[in-house]
Amino acid sequence: MRTNKICAVLGNIQRYNALLPLTNERPLATLPFACKYRLIDFPLSSIVNANINTVYMIFNEGETQSVFDHIGGGKEWNLDGVHNRFFIHLYQDFLKLKAHNQSYYRPLIDYLEKSKSEYTVYMSSKMICNIDLRAVLKIHQQQNNEMTVVYKKVESEKICQTDAVLSLTDNGQITEVRPYMEHVQTSDQENLCMDIYIVQTN
């Protein structure tokens, strides 16, 4: 895979009041998992293992200190060089631009254009999984999809009310996406959206 084949966007803006005060000044992404790890380590591991060398991370204002404390300069993830880098943007900055009728996605578009990547993967830190993004990209290319969405069949009782579930055709095309709380349950298992998407950068 060429180094400019794919870039990554890592979103961490969803807040979970039920986890307060653990998430009072930190995003869900930096909550501990198995002692020394943080939830953000799982998507970062998948990103680095796919030879992706640029990552654009989006966090809420006031929650970034724990991110820098954990990631540091990015050396552990090989994201501390001239060509291998990570960027952090505040979600509230998007909202401020939008409030002034400005192009609020311009900072993200600038990142995508400068990455010169053919594909972009978007991931959140909510789902814990190890995934081969190169395999997902290969499926995306072979099927000539506009967007490829990763999902997993999960028992209904294991799905959070705010999680997104997918309705699919027999050949895997998505016909509907909705929060589980609004979904009409039709079986013991549902297609849980894993918050992993691949699209053509253009």
Image (tube, rainbow, N blue to C red):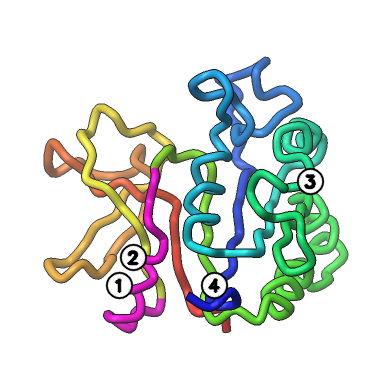
Q: Please name the amino acid that badge 2 sits on.
A: Ala
Marks 1 and 4 close (CB-CB < 8 Å): no
Read off the magenta span.
130-146
Residues at marks 2 and 4, CA–CA distance in whole angstroms: 13 Å
**Residue 23 location (% of width, % of height):** 66, 24
Left or right of 155? Residue 170 is left
Q: Nearer the viewer, residue 167 or 197?
A: 197
**Residue 9 location (% of width, % of height):** 61, 60
- The residue at which mark 3 appears reads as 73
Marks 2 and 4 close (CB-CB < 8 Å): no
Q: Examine the image and state in which quarter residue 86 appears.
A: bottom right
Q: Residues within 10 Å of mark 3 (few under 14, many from 20)?
A: some
- Give whichever of discs 1 and 4 has the lower sequence position: 4
Marks 1 and 2 close (CB-CB < 8 Å): yes
- The residue at which mark 1 appears reads as 139
Q: Please name the amino acid that badge 4 sits on.
A: Ile
- The residue at which mark 4 appears reads as 6
